[in-house]
Image (cartoon, rainbow, N blue to C red):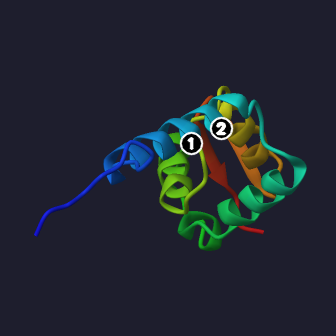
């Protein structure tokens, strides 16, 4: 069976490449999180197992960033770590020990 392709037809691989390029361009154009996204990220941080059941050990920003990445939050934005650091600091009972290290005191 012959496959006939006309010049107007695109190969599926070229469509996939175009979609990836368009996705990359959209990510690069986005500069910061909107207020709705910040509220959603804050809710996700509060659902992190550490914040649900705080204990005596410290939590690191890297662990929270990995958790957010698993939850499909785009952490590739410029200064995403600074924004998430600010959101974590705003949670009740969270004490910032140094950059990237937090402890939550039980209420």
| 33, above or below 5, in the image | above
Residue that carries the numbered disc 1 in the rendered image: 23
- Residue drawn at (64%, 65%), measured in percent from left and top? 51
**Tag 2, which secondary structure?**
helix
Where residue 26 sits, quadrant-wise, is: top right
| 76, above or below 88, in the image | above
- Residue drawn at (60%, 53%), measured in percent from left and top? 73
Q: Position of residue 21 (x, y in %)?
A: 50, 35
Residue that carries the numbered disc 2 in the rendered image: 26
Where residue 93 sits, quadrant-wise, is: bottom right
Numbered marks: total: 2
User: Along the line of sight, which residue is nearer the eye, 84 or 17?
Assistant: 17
Where residue 83 sits, quadrant-wise, is: top right
Confirm whether residue 29 shows in the render.
Answer: yes
User: Along the line of sight, which residue is nearer the eye, 25 or 34?
Assistant: 25
Confirm whether residue 98 shows in the render.
Answer: no
| 33, above or below 104, in the image | above
Relative to 4, is 42 on the left or the right?
right
**Tag 1, which secondary structure?**
helix
Asked if the residue at tag 1 contacts the one at tag 2, i.e. Cβ–Cβ closer than 8 Å, the answer is yes
Q: Position of residue 77 (x, y in %)?
A: 64, 33
User: Along the line of sight, which residue is nearer the eye, 70 or 59?
Assistant: 70
Quadrant where the N terminus sits is bottom left
Quadrant where the C terminus sits is bottom right
């Amino acid at each position: 069976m012959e496959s006939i392709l006309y010049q107007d037809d695109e190969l599926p691989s070229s469509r996939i490449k175009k979609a990836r390029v368009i996705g990359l361009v959209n990510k690069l154009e986005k500069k910061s999180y909107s207020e709705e996204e910040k509220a959603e990220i804050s809710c996700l941080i509060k659902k992190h197992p550490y914040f649900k059941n705080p204990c005596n050990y410290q939590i690191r920003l890297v662990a929270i960033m990995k958790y957010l990445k698993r939850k499909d939050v785009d952490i590739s934005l410029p200064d995403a770590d600074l924004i998430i650091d600010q959101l974590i600091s705003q949670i009740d009972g969270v004490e910032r020990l140094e950059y990237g290290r937090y402890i939550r005191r039980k209420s």
